[in-house]
Image (cartoon, helix red, strand yellow):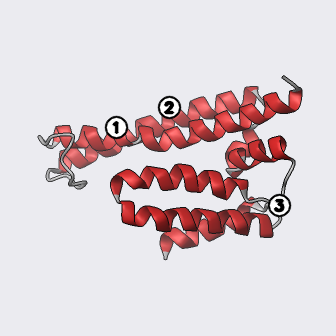
């Protein structure tokens, strides 16, 4: 395996690990439901009791703190910390493999991961999420891969 391929695999692994962080946070939802005395399969997201909400929130903080610490440590060892911070890991992996920098690889990876995750919770909204992810990817390429500009766009998308 060449050095470029190894590096591309590292970027892809970083992207997958970052995505798994979002899935790992679902444990806090399950934990809150158990504290609330409900089944983990109960479709309601909001807790009835305040202590269940607080417990779920604390669980979420612990999960994020541990996972981010592991991701940062792993990224530092493998010289891909910049990609973790800027959110470009998926894009960089596919750019290295295909040598096509103008394809919105990050948006495609985001649509397939983030969008697919929404298929289980609300399929009708998953298509919108996938399209928004592609728009973010195209905007990233158009903005000459400026992470701050795209993060501002993502922030506005979630706030508005």
Residue at which label 2 appears = 66
Q: Say above or below: 44 vs 134.
A: above
Q: Name the residue: 33% across, 40% down.
A: 28
The one nearer the camera, 22 or 58, is: 22
Q: Give left or right: position of 84 versus 21.
A: right
Disc 1 on helix, strand or loop? Answer: helix
Number of the front mark, 2 or 3 = 3
Residue 87 location (% of width, % of height): 67, 50
Disc 1 marks which residue?
27
- Looking at marks 1 and 3 on the same chain, the residue that comes earlier in the sequence is marked by 1
Q: Residue at x 40, y 54 (%)?
A: 119
Answer with the quarter of the image where residue 105 lies: bottom right
Mark 3 sits on what residue?
102
Disc 1 from disc 3: Cα separation: 37 Å
Between 120 and 70, the one lying in front of the other is 120
Secondary structure category for the residue under label 2:
helix
Direction from residue 104 to residue 128 in the image, left or right: left
């Amino acid at each position: 395996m060449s050095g470029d391929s190894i590096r591309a695999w590292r970027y892809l692994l970083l992207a997958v690990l970052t995505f798994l962080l979002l899935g790992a946070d679902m444990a806090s939802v399950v934990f809150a439901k158990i504290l609330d005395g409900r089944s983990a399969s109960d479709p309601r997201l909001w807790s009835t009791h305040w202590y269940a909400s607080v417990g779920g929130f604390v669980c979420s903080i612990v999960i994020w703190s541990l996972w981010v610490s592991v991701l940062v440590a792993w990224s530092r060892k493998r010289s891909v910390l910049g990609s973790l911070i800027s959110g470009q890991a998926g894009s960089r992996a596919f750019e290295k493999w295909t040598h096509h920098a103008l394809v919105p690889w990050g948006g495609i990876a985001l649509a397939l991961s983030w969008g697919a995750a929404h298929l289980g919770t609300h399929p009708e909204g998953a298509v919108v999420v996938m399209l928004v992810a592609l728009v973010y990817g195209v905007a990233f390429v158009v903005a000459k891969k400026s992470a701050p500009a795209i993060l501002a766009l993502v922030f506005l998308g979630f706030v508005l």
